[in-house]
Amino acid sequence: MTAQAAEAGRPGLARPLLRLRVAGYAFFLPFFVVFLVTVVAPLAYALYLSLFQDRLIGGTVFAGLANYTRALGDALFGAGLLRVALFLVVQVPIMLLLALGCALAIDSGRLRWPSLFRITIFMPYAVPAVVAALMWGYMYGDQFGLVGQIGHALDVTLPDLLSRSWMLTSIGNMVTWEYVGYNMIILYAALRAIPEELYEAAEIDGAGAIRTAWSIKLPALRPALLVATIFSIIGSFQLFNEPNIVQKLAPAVISTSYTPNMYAYNLAFNGQQINYSAAVAVLLGLVTVVVAYAVQLITARREKTL
Amino acid sequence: MTAVAEAGPAVAARHSPAARRRRGKSPTLTVIMLVMFVYAVLPLFWLLANASKSGADLFSTFGLWFGGDFHLFANIGDTLSYQNGIFLRWFGNTVLYSVVGAGGAALLATIGGYALAKYDFPGRKLLFAMVLGGISIPGTALAVPTYLLFSRVGIVDTPWAVLIPALCSPFGLYLMRVYAADAVPDSILESARIDGAGELRIFRTIALRLLAPGFVTVLLFSLVATWNNYFLPLIVLNTPDWFPLTVGLNQWNAQANSGTSGAGDATYQLILTGSLLSIVPLIVAFLVLQRFWQSGLATGSVKQ
């Protein structure tokens, strides 16, 4: 406040200040225009579309929240949502624990060839989800699949990984393979940022490796772990690429509503139900944001009580 | 591979504090990590082995080793010439979308993040909050409406429909804002202003160089996002001539699995070889540029 008053009192400063403001806006503008076109406008359009219905008689009419009430009672949408929720609860912790273990191991200084491990475990992240799903899908498969071959060689019947009961696990393995290294790198970067003095203090106090990991490394990792968790939650709810690819290999197992995202896609492009599809997409987005936000809140509260 | 070797000493040097603690290497830990190593590499090795097989060997020989004769180059030839060389066209499309899309996204995020970090203008907190909200909006909620919007403007089934969404990276902006706050000291900006340099010139000659590691990080991760993008191009493109690799490969996959078994066999070979070819450029890019993106990522993931 006082600074502003002082500036107003000295007209000589006002012009540079204005110049800086204009420059700030000008630098931000290009990004913002693209943001408006690619995020804000489609979001607004989705909200708008979701409020209409295409009727046989009368064409497109305003329907209020009818699409939303329909979606809330839609068993297919509910089943898909439950499926990705189950996926989220099982796959995300496994993946993040593996990533955490790898990051701690590479950072420990007790591992041979740490940089080799770091770069190789990260490598699958650079593989397109489509290629990852194709590779794993073929490996699972019975034609020239690895699983069948190994079973044949050992003379045992291994489970059909593309069957109904194994499918979600199989997809979980694909996603874990793709992202474990990425999360490892995020966590490893956070570990590298821990100030050396903390380690020295721990050493003077006579703390061992495990104790150092527990009391210094894990607390320091908390923000990075939270970011990784939030992104994994968003990713799980959006699950589309892997099931969509594997569907070609196991059409009987993966329905058009296997995940909510696939459901929204198929409603719009195979069912011509644009308005309902928009409502499903908005609802899915809402669920994602709420869950992500809840996780953030719970973590923040727990941190406060500690 | 050279990049891995090069990074070795540098990493060891940075690890010197740990080395100072002089703990011995743990064989148990190394063995456990070798399991993760095998997990990460196995599918890629499987892909290489099977893309090197003849059509007959693919179905008759063991998946984790090479076939009787080394067929990789013949398979590459077949893949590149199949359907009048459409694979090369797809490859070119992917390169176009990735280079223009990711390059643009990284540049916009860098300039925007620099503006948010280094200029005090009214509303910047609100704008940043908006962008953060944008990160958490699932792409799904946007894909179908984006398609409908684009079809109104008449750019569906053109490269623009893939390129324009690729230009927006809210996460990139977030990363660059955090990065710019530290990497560009205010004192340098002040003294440049006293010397009478214009803001654009300050950005071009001073800030951009300091922001380079962050820029490369955002560039690489946008590159991965566009190179690997499947959902959006699947929706907004119909003409195979505009497909990126991901959509094209999946079209072959659909063809192989729906056709009679005789027709399918040949296509599997093309899909495997095409998959192999499609992952090489990104892996090389990550290996060559690893020093940049690892330092850039460190900043973004640590400071909230």
Image: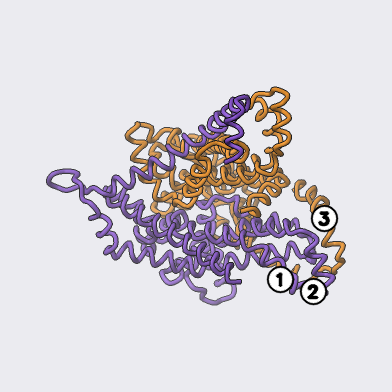
- Which of the labelled discs sits on residue A261, or is there none? none
**From the viewer's perspective, is residue B268 above or below residue B227?**
below
Q: Report the Cα–Cα distance between label 3 and label 1.
A: 25 Å
- Against A232, residue A55 (above or below) is above
Looking at the rendered structure, whether the residues under marks 2 and 3 are on a common chain is answered as no
Kindly check if marks 2 and 3 are in contact, taking CB atoms under 8 A apart as contact. no
| x and y, in percent, of residue A194 in the image | 73, 59
Could you say which chain is coloured purple in the image? A
- Residue pointed to by mark 1: A215
Residue B154 placement (x, y as % from top left): 35, 31
Which of the 4 quarters of the picture holds residue B67? bottom right
Q: Quadrant of the C terminus of chain A?
A: bottom right
Residue at left offset 62%, top offset 28% = A10
Q: Is residue B289 left or right of residue B13?
A: left
Please, what is the three-letter code of the amino acid marked with disc 1? Ser
Label 2 neighbour load within 10 Å: few <14, some 14-19, many 20+:
some
Chain identifier for the orange-coloured part of the image: B
Number of other residues with Cα within 10 Å of mark 3, as a class: few under 14, some 14 to 19, many 20 or more: some
Q: Residue at x 47, y 63 (%)?
A: A294
Q: Quadrant of residue A48?
A: top left
**Amino acid of disc 2:** Ala
How many angstroms separate mark 2 from mark 3 (CA)?
Answer: 23 Å
* Chain letter for the residue marked with disc 1 in the picture: A
**Is A156 drawn above or below residue B108 in the view shown?**
below
Disc 3: which residue? B12
Chain name for mark 3: B
Can residue A204 be spotted in the picture?
yes
Q: Give the quarter of the image for residue A93.
A: bottom right
Disc 2 or disc 3, which is closer to the eye? 2
Q: Extreme front residue here?
A: A9
Task: Identify the residue position indicated by label 2 in the image.
Answer: A207
SS for tag 3? helix
